[in-house]
Amino acid sequence: MRSLEDFLRTHQAGTILDIACGNGAFTRRLTENLKSYISITGLDIKESLRNEFLDNVKEHNVTFITSTIHDYLNSPQSFDTISISNGLHHLEGVGEVLCGVRGILNAGGTIIINELYRDNLTAAQRTQYDQHCFMAKLHRAGGEYHGQTYSRSEIHGFIASAGLSIHHAIDNTNADAPVSHEPGRLIQRARLAMDRAYPEGPTPEVAEELERLTKRNEEVGIAHPPQLTLICRAG
């Protein structure tokens, strides 16, 4: 199996929960490639993403719910397929959360984990890693949980500790990903995060780090990180 799409085209997903769904980019990837599904629920902590999510995922039986995953795990809902894409590092207590996710998975169900990782990065991927660390630090300073990028072994450890077994693993190093030298997106996102974290203005250290990262982006470039996709089942 060479790609997630290879699996999705064979998968009858039933009822789906997409955790930390964001603007629906990964949700749409699911709906556009799955063999079939009954319904899909996008779950995210940010209500501001609702309209963008529903605009991006224009398939049948689509719902968006605003909630923390910790609160939602106490609801009576259960699902046949649960996905988390680039969301593990946004989940505080990720090991405990995955155990809870397993608890709302129907018998015979599937969990799809798609997560960036930090091993064996190219120079341009290292730029992305450094920027991600910087943004995570800003978000935490602004009161939002945002962890660091995990290693492959850490991701596998979370899966094992939750009592999940891996049926398919797709490791995309993205070593040949296009390299961009335009830092505009970094600057825009960083300024928004700094406004929230430091209403009176950022510390000199934070401003200097943004300047350093901007210069590296221009000189070295930035590229998409490697991605590990795991198709898991309980037991």
Image: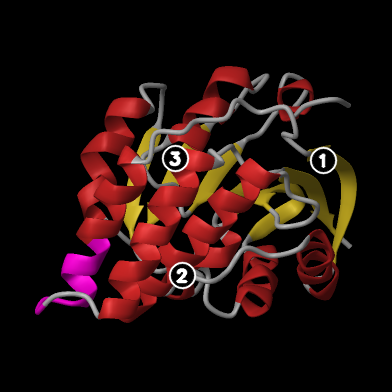
- Which percent across, then down, holds residue 187? 29, 49
Residue type at mark 3? Glu
**The C terminus, quarter of image:** bottom right
Residue position for label 1: 171
Answer with the quarter of the image where residue 171 lies.
top right
- Which percent across, then down, holds residue 24? 41, 37
SS for dot 3: helix
Residue type at mark 1? Asp
Residue position for label 3: 218
Mark 2 vs 1: CB contact within 8 A:
no
**Labels 1 and 3: the sequence-earlier one:** 1
| Residue 85 visible in the displayed image | no
Q: Is residue 121 above or below residue 195?
A: above
**Labels 2 and 1: the sequence-earlier one:** 2
State the residue at coordinates (80%, 52%).
Answer: 120
**Disc 2 from disc 3: Cα separation:** 25 Å
Answer with the quarter of the image where residue 97 lies.
bottom right
State the residue at coordinates (27%, 78%).
Answer: 204
Residue type at mark 2? His
State the residue at coordinates (67%, 45%).
Answer: 123
Answer with the quarter of the image where residue 56 lies.
top left
State the residue at coordinates (25%, 47%).
Answer: 188
